Image: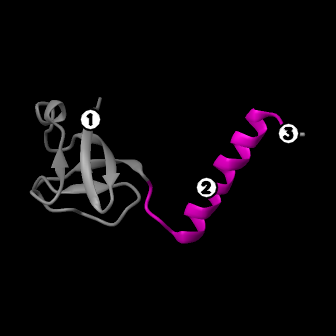
Amino acid sequence: MPSNIERLGQTFHGQINSVGEAKARPVSELGKINGNFALVPDQSPGPIPDQEYSICGSARQGLFIGSRVLILWCGTEAVIVDVIN
């Protein structure tokens, strides 16, 4: 009988395979802010024009052209949750 850890691992493995097969976008990923403040995700299609993505309040203070950012996908909306230094 598999342990709880093994069952959890199997669940994660199944979810990873499902996402891969569905070619779904990741839940979170890294990206960069380009010269006109468009968001360029590392994996998902982009760039996403300024005003078409959301920014968490604390991330707004450190957002500059060239910033590396952590993106959280909420459905089809990209949300910058933090700046990566």
Residue 28 as seen in the image, left or right of residue 16: left
Mark 3–mark 2 Cα distance, whole angstroms, equals 18 Å
Please tell me whether residue 25 belongs to the stretch shown in magenta: yes
Tell me which segment is drawn in magenta.
3-26
Q: The disc labelled 2 sits on which kind of residue?
A: Gln
Q: Which mark is residue 82?
A: 1
Q: Which of marks 1 and 3 is nearer the N terminus?
A: 3
Disc 2: which residue: 15
Tell me where residue 66 sits by quadrant.
top left
> Which quarter of the image is occupied by the N terminus?
top right
Disc 3: which residue: 2
Report helix, strand or loop for mark 3.
loop
Residue at the front extreme, as displayed? 1
Report helix, strand or loop for mark 1.
strand
Q: Which of marks 3 and 2 is in front?
A: 3
What colour scheme governs how the chains and residues are painted in the rendered image of this protein? Answer: one colour
Q: Depth check: 17 or 47 in front?
A: 17
- Up the image or down, 85 lies above or below 28; here it is above
Mark 1–mark 2 Cα distance, whole angstroms, equals 26 Å
Write the residue at 18% across / 38% down: 56
Q: The disc labelled 3 sits on which kind of residue?
A: Pro
Tell me where residue 45 sits by quadrant.
bottom left
Label 2 crowd bin: few (<14), some (14–19), many (20+), radius 10 Å: few
Write the residue at 40% across / 48% down: 28
Q: Position of residue 23 (x, y in %)?
A: 51, 69
- Up the image or down, 70 lies above or below 23; here it is above
Q: Position of residue 60 (x, y in %)?
A: 12, 36
Write the residue at 37% across / 62% down: 44
Q: Depth check: 31 or 2 in front?
A: 2
Please tell me whether residue 19 belongs to the stretch shown in magenta: yes
Report helix, strand or loop for mark 2.
helix
Q: Where is residue 76 in the image (x, y as percent from the top left)?
A: 30, 63
